[in-house]
Image (cartoon, rainbow, N blue to C red):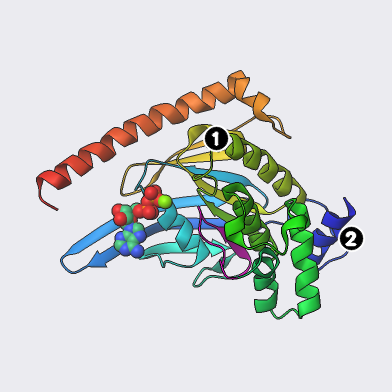
């Protein structure tokens, strides 16, 4: 598609550059993230390492409270590791940056701005003029199928449409890494399935690296090249499962033996970790913490 080709060339700043593999490489080496409060240290992520190749789609799967968002927030630059090293394309992460686009679960759009103005926000912040920012925003609204809603306010859109605006807003900064924290978690199952398929199409066209947090096993296996499973708190990566399913994928792949096999591995690990998490909560309650 000519439009996407132009976008990718512009993102790379090199006309004629090869078509694939220009996302960012994300590396964490022995990253520990702790939150200190007087008299208490809460270790959310413990000595965790990961290496995500440029253009790869990786899902981070784990029980609630295991540190998924914390690890992702560190890659985004919102949270600083207490120890270890975190880099994107070899550069240490120290603050948020437009090359790392973030999509949250919900309520992340500016409610007082129109859809168009929400998506224009990033390009304007990056120094684009009104005309250029509008043209970029319209391109990405087109990509997510919402060009007809440019003048609407977020609250007048369905949850799924709002999340598509959120994705367009993140992509409008031409990120090399797209960070998605349970972006479809608040949507009904039908809409979620459609959003997953359309995200895979966007990813295929846009060639960005995706780190996607979820606690939904089907979602993780359906989307990912690799599923990283996290332990109960403090979070560590306890499994790195390649998903060898053909692409492009549609819901039919969920019926394949390979899908079931990875899903079963995830289910066993998550069940075991959820039991550990429940026991930790019980002990904390018993100790009056
Ligand atoms: P998940 O996304 O896997 O559900 P989180 O990363 O949100 O888990 O949380 C992991 C742990 O870190 C939890 O114990 C949570 O209370 C703690 N935590 C997260 N953010 C903060 C913060 N800003 N201050 C203190 N503790 C936090
Ligand atoms: Mg979370």
Which residue is at a point 28% across and 33% down the rendered structure image?
Answer: 275
Instruction: Give yes or no for residue 109 being in the magenta stretch.
Output: yes
Q: Is residue 104 above or below residue 121?
A: above
Residue 218 visible to an observer of this rendering: yes
Which residue is at a point 43% across and 54% down the rendered structure image?
Answer: 69
User: Which residue matches tag 2?
Assistant: 16
Which residue is at a point 73% across and 54% down the rendered structure image?
Answer: 146
Which residue is at a point 49% across and 67% down the rendered structure image?
Answer: 77
Pick out the residue farthest to the front.
156
Rendered image quadrant of residue 283: top left
- First in residue order: circle 2 vs circle 1: 2
Q: Nearer the viewer, mark 2 or mark 1?
A: 1
Label 2, label 1: how many angstroms apart (C-alpha)?
A: 40 Å
Instruction: Give yes or no for residue 33 being in the magenta stretch.
Output: no
Q: Which mark is residue 189?
A: 1
Q: Residue 51 at x, y = what percent?
A: 54, 51
- Does the Cβ of the disc 2 residue fall within 8 Å of ligand 2? no
Q: Is residue 180 above or below residue 15?
A: above
Q: Crowding near pointer 2: few (<14 within 10 Å), some, many (20+)? A: few
Q: Secondary structure at mark 1?
A: helix
Mark 2 touching mark 1, by CB under 8 A? no
Q: Is residue 75 left or right of residue 33?
A: right
Residue 89 visible to an observer of this rendering: no
Q: Crowding near pointer 1: few (<14 within 10 Å), some, many (20+)? A: few
Q: Residue 163 at x, y = what percent?
A: 60, 52
Main SS of residues in magenta: loop
Residue numbers of the magenta segment:
98-112
Q: Nearer the viewer, residue 181 or 117?
A: 117
Q: Residue 83 at x, y = what percent?
A: 37, 64
């Amino acid at each position: 598609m000519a439009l996407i080709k132009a976008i990718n060339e512009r993102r790379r700043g090199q006309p004629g550059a090869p078509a694939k593999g220009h996302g960012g490489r994300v590396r964490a080496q022995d990253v520990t993230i702790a939150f200190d409060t007087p008299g208490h240290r809460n270790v959310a992520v413990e000595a965790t390492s990961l290496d995500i190749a440029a253009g790869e789609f990786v899902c981070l799967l784990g029980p609630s409270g295991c540190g998924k968002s914390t690890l992702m927030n560190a890659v985004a630059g919102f949270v600083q590791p207490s120890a270890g090293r975190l880099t994107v394309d070899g550069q240490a992460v120290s603050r948020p940056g437009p090359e790392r686009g973030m999509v949250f679960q919900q309520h992340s759009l500016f409610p007082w701005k129109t859809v168009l103005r929400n998506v224009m926000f990033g390009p304007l912040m990056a120094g684009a003029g009104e005309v250029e920012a509008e043209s970029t925003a319209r391109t990405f609204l087109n990509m997510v199928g919402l060009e007809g809603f440019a003048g609407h306010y977020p609250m007048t859109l369905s949850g799924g449409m709002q999340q598509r605006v959120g994705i367009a807003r993140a992509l409008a900064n031409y990120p090399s890494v797209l960070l998605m924290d349970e972006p479809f978690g608040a949507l009904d199952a039908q809409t979620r399935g459609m959003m997953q398929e359309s995200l895979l199409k966007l990813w295929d066209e846009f060639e960005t690296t995706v780190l996607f947090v979820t606690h939904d096993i089907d979602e993780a296996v359906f989307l990912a090249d690799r599923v990283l499973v996290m332990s109960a708190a403090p979070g560590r990566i306890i499994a790195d499962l390649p998903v060898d399913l053909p692409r492009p994928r549609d819901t039919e792949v969920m019926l394949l033996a390979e899908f079931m096999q990875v899903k079963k591995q995830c289910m066993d690990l998550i069940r075991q970790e959820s039991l550990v998490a429940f026991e930790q909560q019980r002990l904390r309650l018993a100790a009056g913490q």
